[in-house]
Amino acid sequence: MKQMFAFSPKIILTLALAMGTVAGCKKEFLDRKPLGELTYDTFFATEAQAIQATNAVYNQFRSWECVGLGYLGVTDILSDDADKGSTPNDQPLLADIDNFNFDAANTYFSQVWTGYYRAIARANIAIKRIPDVPNMNETLRKRLIGECKFLRAYSYFLLMQWFGDLPIITEPLSAEDYYNQSRRPVGEVQALIERDLLDAIEALPNKSGYEPKDLGRATKGAAQGILAKLYLLKKDFPKAEQYSLDLINSMQYSLLSRYSDNFLPIGENGAESVFEITAAALQPDAGGVVGPGATPYNMIQGVRGNPNLGWGFNRPSDNLVSFYENGDPRRDATVIYVGEVLPDGVTVVQPNPEILVPRFNQKAWVPPHPGLQDNGPGNIRILRYADVLLVAAEALNENNKPAEALIFLNQVRKRARGTSQVVLPDVTVTDQALLRERIYRERRAELAMEQHRWFDLLRWGRAEQVMQAVGKNFVAPKHWLLPIPQSEVDLTDGSIRQNPGY
């Protein structure tokens, strides 16, 4: 069974109460009074409790709010990689996101807002209290704080790309503070992310510095990779080059020989994994209740019908299927078709007359596991080494270093083509504009259905062009940002202001 940083249901419940986040609570982040204040005051008394507090931050990233329908809606489904999927009338609010017919009352926006601010809240408490834990190993203390700063930075990185200006919360909030938040400019949010990631780089070990039981924790490489992506977003290409090359030159990572292995159990926390959310399908207890180790991510995207593996949302789009170069093996590794034998080598996907053109995300497939569908055991890949190679290629090309950019671009293509001598030949173009287009195309082919495409389109300034080309009702500049959840605007009497156009 997968190591889960020694999570236990009892520990997670204790930390949830300590942080004012009772499991299953659907209220928005700012609509919650602090709970268990005595627990907060007395919990951080031992080294073990400092570890448990850090584990509780990781645990939030497996929640429905962080990796459920809302998360997939505002990443893949929002982009040209995917359609809503499932049956036509299932989840109309998700269809509104797919077609850009949404408003600020769409509850899927409040899900991700709530989910990632809860992660931030948990990280803030741990960052605040771990320095005062007595009789603690100082190297471990520094590392745990670094892990929490990385997780806080990653949460803000997502929220900023979705919503723009944000409330910046870096301390545990008192009751009266919940309703007095206002949004700070994107530049200030980026500065916080940058500081947290630089601190994490300083504090965290390389991947090889962790014992096997701790694989999956944030590493120096994970912080370097997200920081490089932040600099790409800011168009600070020299620093994007610096931090992506720091990761590459660390020799901590390598491409797996088979592309498809990245998304199977054999690839979890493997050589290509820079950061992923660890999950496990723990055995249900006597009452059928499963532990906190699983996620809904696999179930939501699983085959709907026969075999009945899930709900069938996040359907790879026609546009994506037709996008790949002829013979690119990554298409078959990304898309499950009717009549296909699943990676278990036995199960064949049957037609489902309720679904229009049934097609599913193979990267979310998991083999049989304990419990029901919602006990999803698949790790969620956040950052792969191939992604970092393409970040380096993009930065190097923008820095007028095409020969170096081609090295990393072609590493990705060489691995993808496998033993074929025909498909995916090396790219040789050195003109900056032409090479830029090849790198952009490669990012989509390599990372499709991994929740990167929407952010890439925004960063490249191409969201309007691409969305309108596939028939979506995208309106610029309104849809460059998502609406702030209307519930947050209302709860703060307008101190959190709505984005333009909503």
Image (cartoon, rainbow, N blue to C red):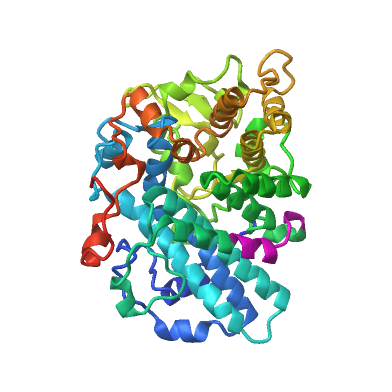
Q: Quadrant of the N terminus?
A: bottom right
Q: Is residue 98 left or right of residue 430?
A: left
| Vertical order, 373 against 205 (above or below) | above
Farthest front residue in view: 400
Q: Is residue 12 visible?
A: no
Range drawn in magenta? 197-208
Count of number-bearing discs: 0
Q: Position of residue 175 (x, y in %)?
A: 32, 79
Whether residue 205 appears in magenta in the rendering, the answer is yes
Which residue: 71% across, 45% down?
245
| Vertical order, 364 against 167 (above or below) | above
**Residue nearest the viewer, comparing 151 with 51:** 151
Q: Position of residue 73 (x, y in %)?
A: 37, 41
Q: Is residue 494 left or right of residue 463?
A: left
Whether residue 76 appears in magenta in the rendering, the answer is no
Q: Is residue 39 visible?
A: yes
Q: Main secondary structure of the magenta part?
A: helix
Which residue: 63% across, 77% down?
48
Q: Is residue 125 left or right of residue 273?
A: left
Residue 442, image quadrant: top right
Residue 36, image quadrant: bottom left
Which residue: 71% across, 79% down?
137
**Residue nearest the viewer, comparing 330 with 430:** 430
**Residue nearest the viewer, comparing 477 with 28:** 477
Q: Position of residue 347 (x, y in %)?
A: 54, 28
Q: Position of residue 156 (x, y in %)?
A: 47, 57
